[in-house]
Image (cartoon, rainbow, N blue to C red):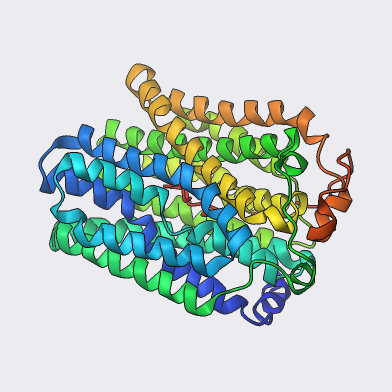
Amino acid sequence: MALDPYRRLFAIPGVPTLLLVGLLARIPSTAVGLTLTLHVATTLDLGFARAGLVTMASTVGMAVGSPLAGRFVDRHGLRPVVTVTTVAQAAFWACAWALPFPVLLVAAAVAGLLALPVFSVTRQCLAAMVPEAQRRSGFALDSMLVELSYMTGPALAVAGVTTLGSGPTMAAIGVGVTTAGVGLIVFNPPTRSAGESAEPAVGVPRRQWVTPAFVALLGTVAAATFVLTGAELALVAAMEHTGQTAWAGLAVAVWSVSSLIGGFLYGGLSRGFSPLPLIGAMGLLTVPVGLVGGGWHWLVLALLPSGLLCAPSLSSTVDVLTRWVPAGARGEAMGFHGTALLVGGAVSAPIAGAVIDGTGPAWAFAVAGSAGVAMVVVALPFWRRRPAAEVLTAPVAQAAVVPVEGTRDGGADEPGTGLNAVPS
């Protein structure tokens, strides 16, 4: 496996710094949901139902705020948006530990709306800094780093709440998010390439890039996280039913490592693939997992093939997005991509839970995988109506007059996103 694609990637000025800042900024962000849940359920002793309401309020806020933040980045630049969201996060985490539940519920929604857009901004800046021919390797590596953040953040959240308490843990998250925001403000990576920045900044009408093909792309993004969230819940439930819950953390970690390996291999290939076969194959490989018996290690082994396709599937969706959407609307499009990631996981969790309670974990694997395959089939006819090649490379000033028509896609990407959560 050649390392040349990654060597060339790290040789681009600013890219190593962007990836490092993105990784460190995402770790506190990935700890938010679990920290809020444990704070409400254990510290406030209000149970997991109310904890779920706070998490839902935060998630809804992020789903709405992600494309809005991206639109403001497109129009006003990175620093103003990051400054506002950093101040908002610092204010929320400074007082969240002392808020009564009704106030915390509203504050969590507002904080989600004004969340630091670190996931979408990192991808947007990566697209601006990396030449198109190397973006697939860049997005694959970014997906791997997202995976690492989701392997780290939630674990630190649990360790912090159980050893130090929710108050100090929430304060630590506040410090981490604020530091990340300040780092982005100081670094101020470009959101457009040098060639794109040289053109006059002209607004790009949504009707030009929010096409049936783009909506289908978002549907496949949501389908991917639907499969991953449902499979993870089914895995944990299957291990609980067999009395092997103590090994659940290790099982999820092994599954996540398979995603890292898959992302590394995919980023080093000479060419990429469309998200449709990748996500479809991931769904198909998930369907029969529930039939495996004989212990948790066999179950994890059966999940490894689908895990290998996780990072490649999600990174390929970002790669396609950057090819389909003009640079002047890339931030908002990345925001919608983040929303799709959130929606897929949010819809999957209650459906998988209902299937597990009703028929057992084996059927949850089947439902999650089948849903992913079905979404790919639905997206296929719309995929053929993707934007013309001229749209993908046109300068911002010319983008509004380029016609939309079918063309061949030469491209193949939350985190990327992790196996055990969905970033905005």
* Along the viewing direction, whichever of 234 and 374 lies nearer the viewer: 374
Left or right for 243, reference 183: left
At x 13%, y 59%, the residue is 165
- Residue 307 percent across, percent down from the top left: 54, 47
- Residue 363 percent across, percent down from the top left: 45, 23
Q: Is residue 9 above or below residue 140?
A: below
At x 37%, y 22%, the residue is 354
- Residue 332 percent across, percent down from the top left: 61, 50
Q: Is residue 333 above or below residue 234?
A: below
Q: Is residue 81 above or below residue 224?
A: below
At x 55%, y 78%, the residue is 17
Left or right for 411, reference 151: right
- Residue 94 percent across, percent down from the top left: 22, 62
* Along the viewing direction, whichever of 162 and 123 lies nearer the viewer: 123
At x 47%, y 47%, the residue is 65
Q: Quadrant of residue 32?
A: bottom left
Q: Is residue 173 above or below residue 342?
A: below
Left or right for 165, reference 353: left
Q: Is residue 293 visible?
A: no
* Along the viewing direction, whichever of 193 and 106 lies nearer the viewer: 106
